[in-house]
Image (tube, helix red, strand yellow):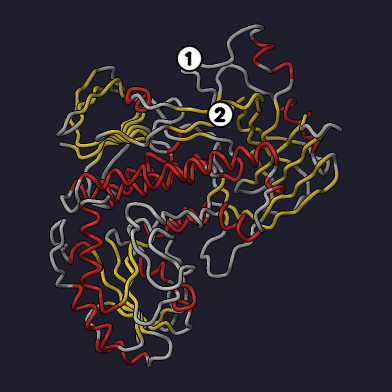
Amino acid sequence: MTDVLVVGAGPVGLSAAAELLRHRVRCRLIDRLAAPLPYAKAVGIQPRTLEIWDRMGLARAALEAAAELRGQLIYVNGAERARIELALPPEVPYGFAALPQYETERLLDAYVTGLGTTVERGTELLSFTQDQDGVTARLRTAAGAEEEVRVGYLLGCDGAHSTVRKQLGLTFEGGALPEEYMLADVEADWDLPYGYGVRSSHVTAEGATDDLLVCIPLPGSGHRYRMSMLVPPELSAEAADPGGDREPGDGVAHGLEGGRAPELSHIQAVVDRLAPAPATLSRMRWASIFRISHRIVDSYGDGRVFVAGDAAHIHPPTGAQGMNTGIQDACNLAWKLALVVRGEAGPALLATYDAERRPVGEEVVGRTVRHATQGMENDPADPRTIMLREAQLLVAYRGGPLARSTYGPADAPQPGDRAPDCTGLTTPIATYPSRLLDVLRGHTEHVLLLYAADPAQLAAAAAGGGVVREADGGPATEGQWQTVAILAREAPPTGLDVLTVAGFHDAEGEFARLYRPDGPTGFVIRPDGQLGARFPLAATAAALSDYFAALSAPE
């Protein structure tokens, strides 16, 4: 029996399949479309997504295909109002990138294919039922035949109009922005700074925005941009169907529309009015009209069926939060599903997907609506916090069901927080320093990090971690994690010689600066790159046992 059926092969569904396959879970991936759409819908790739792709071994291919996003130029009524620099602290390994959605899907599709699974194109989910032991799904294949399949779990990554969400009976509360927009992929011959997006608006005396142009640079030669702007009256839904119903059949007005399509002249007219520099547009690849809604489900799953990405939350594209949030949904759920499928954790672990990810979705929906209506430049947070938050580096699950204890300084990375990257980790053989991401790359298991200045303490903790006492949830096994020891900067690197596990020297003190260990300290890094546990090194065996027992039966 297939372990998981993933419905929808956009960036979120492909990410879910990739992570499941990496974790040795058998899955099928279906999509009702006969071929991927050639549209640059979602463009921005956040640093946190690049960290996830680094762990998968996909970051290099993404970097080769992407363009750098350096910042945004903001104009109001023809005058430059702000210049936002997308600057992050030096320890963050990746910056902001632009990658058209069709390229993101191409890279992920190739990755999934390399793991032995292909997208079943033209295959549609018709219905499903679930019971205590699995899910029965009815499909229609590309050939028109109906097929009944039995799977362990079902994951709906099938977008804003999700069949999975509707049949699961989840609510999708929210509303739609009243404006209609045009979206186009075009070249502009202006001479604006490379790597900067543009947001230019006209604001009335009463403070209302009645004209808008947003341009995001795309990879490739020439000045190619994904441009969005308000729909002119002649292309509006009211003009096309006076007195008609503007809402689709399911009441969710979100995404690209068929039928009405702008021409290059419509896009050029807005650029003529609002562009900060004269520009002639050319080589339009595609254009469409789209609507924006802001909605979120009441639950990210029920029983053996879950939703992720646009099937769970939709919102304005401000800050490129949507696709990246969906990819992180998929990553969060995949490692938990894998543990449950393999019998290494109890089914109750799957409830933590909703507990951890729905608050994130709620925050993103609220923030992007505020930024879309008020402008990101009016965000009251300090610039550093804004950048880290937009980069999705502040996503944390403190206080959640899997982060039940703290150790050390409260403002240090604690369970639930993102595990920071750091550089300056050396070994006696390599003549160059490594990043922590280099150490974690390719691992699908939890990683146990042990830090101390005394090699004997590291050796003892590593040995103690191999024999973990039984806890309420049953014994944890050493195969559920990989162990890495980090020797403090003040200790001579020759101390690594006594270790029987992978060891690195914190030669520049960067690990200590960013993790702020309270003396000899142990850490567990989850498969999704969040901290799972933090504890005194002497308590390694007990802490591991307690942590994995929590996975078996989280509160």
Instruction: Judge whether 267 appears above or below 234 on screen.
Output: below
First of labels 2, 1 by sequence position: 1
* Residue 268 as seen in the image, left or right of residue 461: right
Q: What residue does disc 1 label? A: 249
Dot 1 lies on which element?
loop
Instruction: Judge whether 402 appears above or below 173 on screen.
Output: below
Q: CA distance from mark 2 to mark 1?
A: 15 Å
> In terms of depth relative to the viewer, which is nearer, 141 or 181?
181
Q: What residue does disc 2 label? A: 293
Give how far across and how far down residue 293 sits, in percent: 56, 29
Give how far across and how far down residue 543 sits, in percent: 25, 68
At x 71% / y 48%, what residue is drawn? Answer: 377
> In terms of depth relative to the viewer, which is nearer, 163 or 258?
163
At x 23% / y 45%, what residue is drawn? Answer: 348
Res. 126 image quadrant: top left
Give how far across and how far down residue 325 sits, in percent: 47, 45
At x 28% / y 44%, what residue is drawn? Answer: 350
* Residue 421 appears in the rendering: no
Res. 59 image quadrant: bottom left
Type of amino acid under label 1:
Gly
Name the disc covering residue 361, or none: none
Type of amino acid under label 2:
Ser
* Residue 494 appears in the rendering: yes
Quick one: label 2, few (<14), some, or many (20+) residues within 10 Å? Answer: many
* Residue 427 as seen in the image, left or right of residue 129: right
Quadrant of the rendering where the N terminus is positioned: top left
Instruction: Judge whether 92 appears above or below 146 on screen.
Output: below
Quick one: label 1, few (<14), some, or many (20+) residues within 10 Å? Answer: few
Dot 2 lies on which element?
strand
Give how far across and how far down residue 67 sits, in percent: 59, 53
Instruction: Judge whether 287 appears above or below 512 on screen.
Output: above
